[in-house]
Amino acid sequence: MRALLILTVKNEGAFLLEWLAHHRACGFTDVLAFSNDCSDGTDLMLDRLAEMGGLTHVRNSGPHDQGPQWAALKAADKHPLMKQADWVLFSDIDEFVNIHVGNRTLPALLDALPDADAIALTWRLFGNAGHVAFQDRPVTQTFTRAAPATLGWPWRAQMFKTLFRNDGAFRKLGVHRPRNPDPARTPRWFDGSGREMPPSNRIFSDYRQGNYQLVQLNHYALGAMESYLIKADRGRANREASAFDMGYFVERNLCDVVDTSVQALNSTDLRTALHADPILGPLHAQAVAWRRARFATLMAEEPWRALFGRLLMSKPSRALSPAEAALLHAHIPATHRP
């Protein structure tokens, strides 16, 4: 079985090797990575990884009318790796597939859902939990406090990415779910707890029930406060303008429970081997140094100092009660209600 993971990335070299080692251990056989105008050497790391095998690197330089992410998806649709893949997932560098069944690998998940054509991997948000300084250590070991298993607000917290069978039922890639379904096919969708999902165009799971029994998608959307400034400076991958502000931070800084389940999939040896490579190791160190220097540069400007000050003043966000969440959902128009 060939499982393809598609990634778009910009200036995330400090996190690349952990992410790659984890997903190789998880069972993904191929990675198609698109880099976008990197300054920290992420593109050079991807070049080296391509030389080592198991990863294909495509430079995705701008400008992009709809943002670099959509440009990359359009290019990926036509890439030879798409034709060779049995299963496909589009993921970001801050998302880690976390399987809870069998030996915690992709084959174990597929064995648990043999009838699935598409599996919704629902986000589980991992909060900042008071981490100020960026540290060069694994994200999955640093950030271990997460949102509760059921979360009614913000509704975007229950969005998912889709692992799908690449047999022609879907004819275009999408950010959260594959697009352009074949009208002659009726693919079967299952959620992360193994329940079959009704036909829908939704990109979020039902927040009133647990969605993580078999698999969840750990989403480390915030990172350390220093890294959050760099993320805000970079902007979103699917649009040029930045939308990372205190509102984004507060909605995702949920730290109600400890969840270290992702650490049960041991990728330490793979990660160590990547760091030991004579080219990758120094490039990783270069990306770490770039990140620290970029933070210092941003802090020379008042707007960034102000944002950083607000981050320092903030506390972990309180998850709303079901009654409070219901109050908010009651005011959402029926056509937009999750």
Image: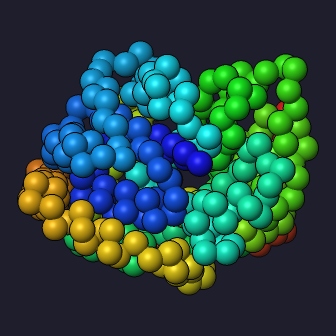
Q: Tell me the quarter of the picture where residue 57 sits.
A: top left
Q: Tell me the quarter of the picture where residue 153 sits.
A: bottom right
In front: 65, or 110? Answer: 110
Colour scheme used in the picture? rainbow
In front: 322, or 66? Answer: 66
For this view, does 109 lie left or right of residue 324? left
Q: Tell me the quarter of the picture where residue 178 sits.
A: top right
For this view, does 113 lie left or right of residue 98? right
Q: Residue furthest front?
A: 1
Q: Percent position (x, y) of residue 31?
A: 42, 44
Looking at the image, residue 206 lies above or below residue 74: below
Q: Residue at x 83, y 36 (%)?
A: 187
Q: Residue at x 55, y 46 (%)?
A: 3
Q: Residue at x 72, y 68 (%)?
A: 214
For this view, does 273 lie left or right of residue 267? left
Looking at the image, residue 85 lies above or below residue 158: above
Looking at the image, residue 130 lies above or below residue 230: below
Labels in figure, total:
0
Q: Percent position (x, y) of residue 239?
A: 44, 29
Q: Residue at x 77, y 43 (%)?
A: 117
In front: 70, or 281? Answer: 281
Q: Percent position (x, y) of residue 122?
A: 67, 56
Looking at the image, residue 18 lies above or below residue 31: below
Say whether residue 105 is visible: yes
Q: Percent position (x, y) of residue 259?
A: 56, 80
Say whether residue 295 is visible: no
In front: 35, or 164? Answer: 164
